[in-house]
Amino acid sequence: MTYAASLALTLPEMILAGGALVLLMIAAFAGDRSARVVHWLAVALIAAAGLALLGPAGDGGDAFGGLYRADPFAAFAKLLIYIAAAVSLAMAPDFFARDTTGGPQGQLRAEYPVLILLSAVGMGMMVSAVDLLTLYVGLELQNLVAYILASFMRNNTRSAEAGLKYFVLSALASGILLYGISLLYGFTATTSFDGIATAVAAQVEGGGLGAGTLIGLVFLLAGIAFKIAAVPFHMWTPDIYEGSPTPVTGFFASAPKVAAMALFVRVTVEALGPATDAWRQIIIFAALASILLGAFGAIGQSNIKRMLAYSSINNIGFALIGLAAGTEAGVAAVMSYMAIYIAMTLGSFLVVLQMRDADGRPVETIASLSGLSQSRRGLAAAFAIFMFSLAGIPPLLGFWAKFLVFDAAVAAGLWPLAAIGIAASVISAFYYLKIVKTMYFDDPAPAYAPSNSVLEGGLIALAATAVSPLGYFAVPALAGVAANAARALF
């Protein structure tokens, strides 16, 4: 394949990277006065990158000598990433502008959308990586941006602490990942996913995986598990979610989760597919531990962002049940789950953005939601929809997401895993229903400041509609796209 053809396959990343450099120059010369314009130009670039997936970048094969793959699986994951990134950009300007400690523009900075674009470039490389080197480069590009985003509010101690914690723990995870990569390379003599699969298949046929390959597999999956916040690599999530600015937290809970989960799926199915019996045990443990810890850990939380952090851990556990099946249906269930998950999660964080006192300062306590149904009926109804959907209560779309992963597990003979997952979902429903009870049955707390943002209100309404029973009209299309994406890996 020629160099020009390879560039055509990476057109979404080229658009985002080139656009980020142009916007960076605009920000450098025009300053923070251009912040809102740069934000919306960044959204336009993300839309252009999404449209580029309709061409060869959506299903054009391998590029750059087998380092990068443009296939339907990567295209679907990128589409979800771009949607989450665009919403994260749309929810940021008003939030940062309200913090007047940063000057006339508040904390609104023109470099924020540039960072989101560069993060999207890294995530695009992650989901298209078919070589351990591309995997690591994409992952670290996304990580470097995440450190800055977490500590973006420079005058806020919690934000600075979140960035530092994320940096230290992520550096440890990167070391674990690199050690796993080095072991796999040493014992398979290749960094290509296809080459690793061939070498692993030969070892399995010869009597079983070698000890070095097995240890490398464990370290590799551990490093990626940190990015999806699966137990026991979840410890960073509550603190980082609480300390980061709310738009950044919403971004962390959506786009990077989709990218890391897609990477996890591609590595296990494509590179380590012949060793399914070996990694399935790891996935089952991570799934059950994440479900249970996420459920019990959220019960005692008083901060809404920390509660949503444990909710994300819990939901990742359910998604991993689909991956544990190791089948095409299981992969399709995982991708459908992630699509529904980002709608529920982004909708929830958009509601959190509305939680402000009379002076416009963010309020994050769950107790402040008391009596919300009386002061802001529409907002309370939308939040109730998101909570019921996250709990998996029918007929909301969150129920369908859980049904898909449980059905895939049962079809693969993992019915005990599905049974435990169903039982654990009852536990997680407790803290979601507690939010609804607080809004509708507790004595009213001081009312939140009214919202003047038509855009935020529209996005909340759109997300609530998407996960409501009306969302089932989109299920056939979603199922078809997810199945096509999963087919590309088998």
Image (tube, helix red, strand yellow):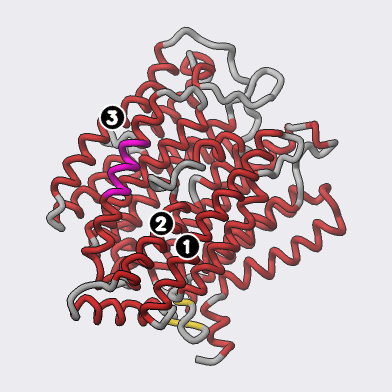
Cα separation, mark 2 vs mark 1, equals: 7 Å
> Which residue is more in the foreground, 223 or 115?
223
Q: Residue furthest top?
A: 443
> Which residue is more in the foreground, 444 or 165?
165
Residue at mark 2: 222
Q: Does residue 82 lie above or below 104 as drawn?
A: below
Answer whether residue 38 is magenta in the image: no
Residue 409, given in percent of the width and then of the height, sits at: 19, 53
Q: Does residue 479 lie above or below 351 as drawn?
A: below
> What residue is rendered at 67% in x and 56% in y?
115
Mark with earlier residue (2, 1): 1
Crowdedness near tag 3: few (<14), some (14–19) or many (≥20) residues, C-alpha within 10 Å: some
Mark with earlier residue (2, 3): 2
Residue 380 seen by the camera: yes
Specify the label residue 177 is tagged with: 1
| Label 3: which secondary element | helix
> What residue is rendered at 19% in x and 46% in y?
417
